Image (tube, rainbow, N blue to C red):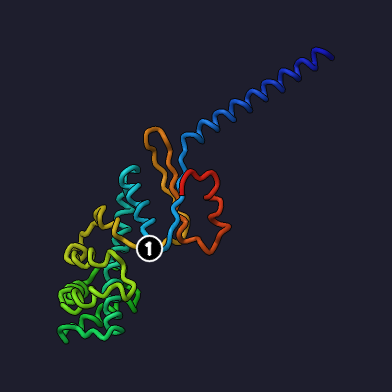
Amino acid sequence: MGMCQSQEDKELMMKSRQIDREMVQEHLANQKIVKLLLLGAGECGKSTVLKQMRILHDNGFSDEEIMQQRAVVFSNTVQSMALILRAMNTLNIPLDKAERETDARIVLDVIKSGDDSEPFSPQLATALKRLWADKAVCEEAYSRRSEFQLNDSAKFFLDKIDDIAHPKYRPSEQDILHTRVKTTGIVEVKFQLKNVEFRVFDVGGQRSERKKWIHCFEDVNAI
């Protein structure tokens, strides 16, 4: 009986030591993880920060991801021009050249058809260029952009319509940093820096669904 008890004690002691080792290992592992949570109002730059972190610390974007960003650039460019044109109507700013009305219809028709994320046709590219060269658009309306909701990247893309319209257009890192897409889920970026694992979360698109993102606050090191 004594021998049996002794054997049981040994097994319990071994299990206890194993649990202790696992707890120590988990503690050491957790010490090497820094968890950051990005919070802020919409369009305050959270997604841009995440993209910058990927470029600087996580080998940037794959070829597939880069090519997927083409559609975002196309859409951001066309949507920006459409927003300006609609604002001009609200603000009673007429086009500097009446013949640009045809170009405006081309842009708005693309939006209406839902083709704004498609590569630019020669007709659309020409319309965008001529509209952006119209002083009423690029000067008067754009100078009043604080009176309507226009992406801060609008000028960046509208200034490079020729590049974006090229059939072999490939977004640069700067292009990707300037893209604007509403965050609709929890986005996480992981990267290693000096033997420390960083996990950064953007929950900007989940404010109305608290249960889906509240767990992100667990063990957070910084917000």
Residue 126 in which image quadrant: bottom left
Q: Is residue 147 left or right of residue 134?
A: right
Residue 114 in which image quadrant: bottom left
Q: Position of residue 220 (x, y in %)?
A: 50, 45
Q: Is residue 123 visible?
A: no
Which element is circle 1 on? loop
Q: Position of residue 34 (x, y in %)?
A: 46, 40
Q: For the point 16% across and 78% down, which residue is it?
A: 134
User: Quick one: 180 or 207, which is closer to the camera?
Assistant: 207
Residue 100 in which image quadrant: bottom left
Q: For the point 32% across and 63% down, which residue is it?
A: 72
Q: For the point 20% across and 80% down, which residue is it?
A: 103
Q: Position of residue 154 (x, y in %)?
A: 26, 67
Q: Is residue 57 left or right of residue 220?
A: left
Question: Which quadrant is the N terminus positioned in?
Answer: top right
User: Quick one: 191 or 171, which is closer to the camera?
Assistant: 191
Residue that carries the numbered disc 1 in the rendered image: 43
Q: Is residue 127 left or right of residue 115?
A: left
Q: Position of residue 25 (x, y in %)?
A: 54, 29
